[in-house]
Image (cartoon, coloured by chain):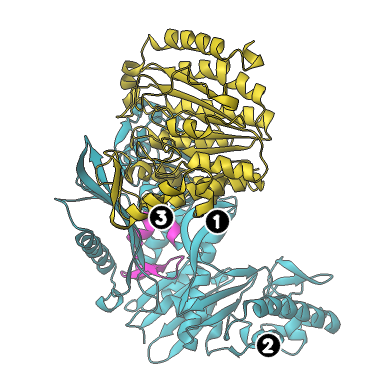
Chain colours: A cyan, B yellow
Amino acid sequence: MFTGIDIGGTNTDIAYIDECIIAKKIPNSKGFAAAIREAPSDCRLAISTSQALNHLITGNGSSVRTITIPGPGLVYGGAVKGAVSPRGEIMEPIDTEEIEHLLRGCRADAIAIAGKFSVRNPMPEEIVRDIARQFFDDDRIAISAPLGGLNFPARITTTRINASIKATVVSLIRMIGKNHSDFRFVTSDGGLCGPERAVDNPSLLYHSSPATVALGARYLSGKKDCLVVDIGGTTTDLVPLTDGKPVLAPLFVKGKRTMINAVVADSVPFGGDSCIRDRLMKFRSANARAFGGGEPTLTDALNVLGAEIGDFCRSDCLDRHKAEEAVSEYIDTIAGIIHVMDPAVIVGAGYLAPLLIPDLAKAARTPYLVPDHAQSANAVGAAVSRISMSLHVHADSQRNILTVNGTEYPLSGRMTDDELVKYATDILINMARKEGAPSGDLHDIVTSEFSAFTVVRGGRAQGRITDFVISIAPGISVEAP
Amino acid sequence: MKTGIVFSSSYLHHQQSETHPERVERLSYTMDQFIEEGIFDLPEIVLIPPKKATRSEVLSVHTDKYLSFLEEASVTGGMIDIDTRIPPGLIGDALIAAGGAISGADAVLNQDVRNVFVLCRPPGHHAGPDRGAGFCYLNNAAIAVRHLQRRGMRRIMILDWDAHHGNGTQEIFYRDPSVLFLSVHQYPFYPGSGQIDEIGKDEGAGYSVNMPVHAGSSDQVYSYLLGEIILPLAENFQPDCIVISAGQDNHFTDPLTGLALTARGYAGLMHEMTILADTICFGRLVVILEGGYSVEGGLPYTNLGIIAALAGLDLSSIREPEILHDLLNRSISEMAMPGAIRMAADLKKTLRPYWNCFG
């Protein structure tokens, strides 16, 4: 059985998929552990933790001390001595006394360690991490090398995110592990990753919701080219799919670029919990009155107009005229955007989709589909997703070193480009298999950003440097029912 | 206002041979450094794609006969000299390099950016009107200057700080008083020209200014010449735009030259040039890459220093790694500074009839 769990802001959705789909909604007030216990221990389990982690990352959160090892170049805060060259050679050693002195008086909750070019040689970061372990638990220390790609400022930002959420992810893994020996997390690109990879790079789990919903909507509707309209509590997310795939792009958090690759979604700050004051507001103050809140929301407006959502009698305090105005404002705003995007068809997802999508489609003059279980598209997407993985490969044949996401592998002799890609493909496949990917999910392997040049010293060719990214794209598992 | 970087992957295409000093590897580590520093995500930076120069743009500088020769030799390959072979397809790469200089100049003139760094290959400053030489085929800087003039700029100042004398550029503008050409270069050295008595001819007399310096010349020498010669002349000439032929082969790690400039020194020079440009020509500065062959130890740090200075970023960490400090100390010649002082005095005397600032 394929089981998907999506921890939302208010509820946790669970979807069981076998010959049929069973979806459940469990209020978060009952505790996340209750939802985990619901899932049978022998199922294939995938969990989307997006909302819980989003809150941690965008809130004030824990205080993180950043230690950067920038070497020569631009100026970065928290700099300590040490430098790595673009080729990964140590140009200046770490001053261990400086690090010890710095950490001895440090009162931060977590430590983020990021070195320039650490993805070409992680050693300076590892030396600082080993010293930090004398002062902090390992689940409060994050380094940047496992993030894989070049972009030091983005790695600093992402490593800070990782340091702030690593302890939460580790305790989540322990808690899930009590009931399930084998499970995976949904990542920001809509794929899955194993717990070990999540600990190395917890940011992989951030902002997975739009990707998960898009994948679920695609599975439930069978539509490959469409616009998924996910009506959530605080936002309505519009995710275009082409040939079944969403567009991925680097994610910005608080205005700063990260190394997180996430689904591109047009997010409009209107959702079921958007409160109604003089008009429909672009923020959430609490739950809808129908779900125990104090102020009327878009959900309550729908109840006033005839829906029977939650404790719908509590919605009656809202004036009918105001309810109509609020729903109209929602429809006009979203339909205007959809009309410009001009999709072949819109696929609705989210709890309010059956109630709002028909009117939205009519106003946007676009065909629509609201598949069965659209309310649980997020959990369905988690359940049917497959392992995805992206490796940044840097081969330096003069130094006989291959670095893959900051980890060094042996490189013997001079390989042709094809041999190198094959070598990296084998590493990728082995890593994916270790995380439980079935063979059928390992065919969609893509090589991108390929570049190569010859290293010449003393007028003679001494080696070749090759860079590329090799990935298993996210998608629906071949084993999904 | 922002700083532009003109670059595209087509600048990693040209290659005379795998082991030639002017090879793809020159820009590979620089681009790694730029990407790792997040340069292209900075709000101060705009990436500008290069266009291909047209025939008429090239013919504003080079002869039709020479351009036709390059076009024909590019079909099957050919040779200008032992250092400057013509690989098949060369003309396409050379036109993109020259076109990049034009794209950069346009971005400055259109006020899309305040200043621009054109990271093009192959370089251009040894190419004269009817010949290429010294790894150069089309004179990118000269083509940009003529383009600027076609768009209304009257007086252009070119500062060529490549370690080698910019003989091609000098030849192109030798009789032209609308272009003030200044070159600081190692001497004696390739190409053998660039002595202080080469000052231009006819109406252009006094508009070619050569500052030959000894091997081992350091940041101090360049800073001295900036204050003594370059800034006074620029203020006297009052250009509408400044073009810099930025050769990064003065760096102390460069394998082909013997100078001793540091990345910080380069950044400092460029910082002074941005202040100068702000003072006399509304910040208009078009910087075009020429030589520079220290692919690992020099170019990533010098090119970053230049872009940081152009964009007004904090330069306090633009420096060389510790591992190179001994080499730097060994590269500096104590004879260079006294030599530069004598040369500057002689040069002022030579130029006095032409420039009030030396009167």
Q: Residue furthest left?
A: A413
- Using the image, tell me which numbered label, if any, was put on residue B92: 3
Give the CA distance from mark 1 to mark 2.
33 Å
Identify which residue is drawn at 60% across, 48% down.
B106
Q: Which residues are magenta?
A: A178-204
Q: Amino acid at mark 3?
A: Gly
Residue A53 drawn at (x, y percent): 51, 60
Q: Tell me the quadrant of the picture where the N terminus of chain A can be found.
A: bottom left
Which residue is denoted by mark 1 in the rendering? Answer: A252
* Distance between mark 2 and mark 3 Cα atoms: 49 Å
Instruction: Give residue A385's position: percent from left, percent from top.
Output: 40, 76
Mark 2–mark 3 CB contact (< 8 Å): no
Q: Which mark is residue B348?
A: none
Depth check, mark 2 against mark 3: the one in front is: 3
| Residue A466 visible at all | yes
**Whether residue A265 is situated above or below residue A221 in the rendered picture:** above
Instruction: Provide the residue designation for mark 2.
Output: A365
Amino acid found under the numbered disc labelled 2? Arg
Q: Label 1, label 3: how many angstroms apart (C-alpha)?
A: 38 Å
Q: Quadrant of the C terminus of chain A?
A: bottom left
**Foreground: disc 1 or disc 3:** 3
Asked which secondary structure carries label 3, the reply is: helix
Q: Secondary structure at mark 2?
A: loop
Check the image and report above or below for A131 versus A394. Answer: above
Q: Position of residue B7 (x, y in %)?
A: 47, 49
Q: Amino acid at mark 1?
A: Phe
Identify the residue at image location x=40%, y=63%.
Answer: A175
